[in-house]
Amino acid sequence: MLEAKNVVKIFEGFRALDGATMTVPRGAVYGLVGPNGAGKSTLIRHLTGVYRPDSGELLLGGQPVWENPTVKRRMAAIPDDWYYFQQSSISEMAKLYEGMYPTFSRERYAKLREVFPLNDKMMIRRMSKGMQKQAAFWLTVSCMPEVLVLDEPVDGLDPVMRRQVWTLLLDDVSARGTTVLVSSHNLRELEDVCDHVGIMSRGRVLLERSLSELQDNTVKIQAAYVSAEEPALPAELQILHRSNVGRVYTYIVRGQREEILQRMQITEPLLLEAIPLTLEEIFIYEMGGEDYAVREIVL
């Protein structure tokens, strides 16, 4: 289990992390999402031991991450700005990774040649951004880590390679119980691979739940009425957003689907149905309370 507990980090008076707390369960694929500047990359750098917190704890399996080589060998990371030596090739970087990670597998490295169509003797700095990202996955997955931390992992990859990489990672989760923490703005893609989600804003984790629980707890309701005038809604409904086109009203409501539908019957709708929300919609409406709603601009 990978944990952050009340982590605070201040850069020149700016509170980048403001008591951030999160828990990534063992064997989970955890998606960390949030607007630009929310603190996602900063939190990831703390979890991987790059930054030292001003206060709070970063733990893996109950052991502190900061300046703990034994713990750090259990995790591998691909940051958004992946580091490599300027004159190095993939095979030379593989020697470096092999020296750092006792679990590095030469057998797996060789097998992954079939997945990543790269010349491992070529200098990495001569490769395109997408090729460099493939090289990062080739090396990192060969380490066979217990925990894999990814920041915008498939940015720059073509659709086929994106699917190949996700298949490779999910196979590791299934076969080896690898824990994956991934930060990305591509919420549609995260929805396909994650089983847990954390939403960050302003240096804090606002909420974290399993994806199924998150989707079950926020419902999109569509209701059609005889009149275009909206009827009085049950006061106990927690409505996050409402809109209408003519006599058809759409509500985003927090709560359980069946209970909401039952309570909505009092409005005597001609048509009433619940529609599953996407992760992107959940993110937008949850962030609406943080002054991050989508606004209409009149020019």
Image (spheres, grey):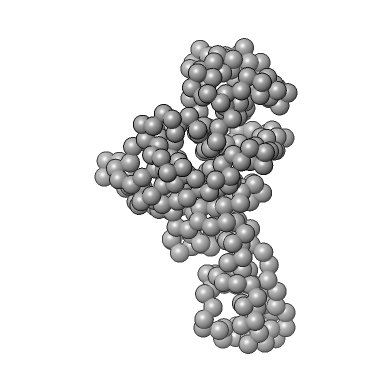
Q: Quadrant of residue 283?
A: bottom right
Q: Residue at x 69, y 83 (%)?
A: 269
Residue furthest toward the left? 13
- Residue 146: percent from left, percent from top: 55, 36
Q: Is residue 296 above or below residue 138?
A: below
Q: Residue at x 44, y 57 (%)?
A: 206
Residue nearest the viewer, comparing 34 with 205: 205
Residue nearest the viewer, comparing 118 with 106: 106
- Residue 292: percent from left, percent from top: 47, 58
Q: Is residue 29 visible?
A: yes
Instruction: Indicate left or right for 2 with 174 as reference.
Output: left
Q: Is residue 146 above or below residue 290?
A: above
Q: Is residue 45 visible?
A: no
Q: Quadrant of residue 159?
A: top right
- Residue 84: percent from left, percent from top: 50, 21
- Residue 54: percent from left, percent from top: 29, 42
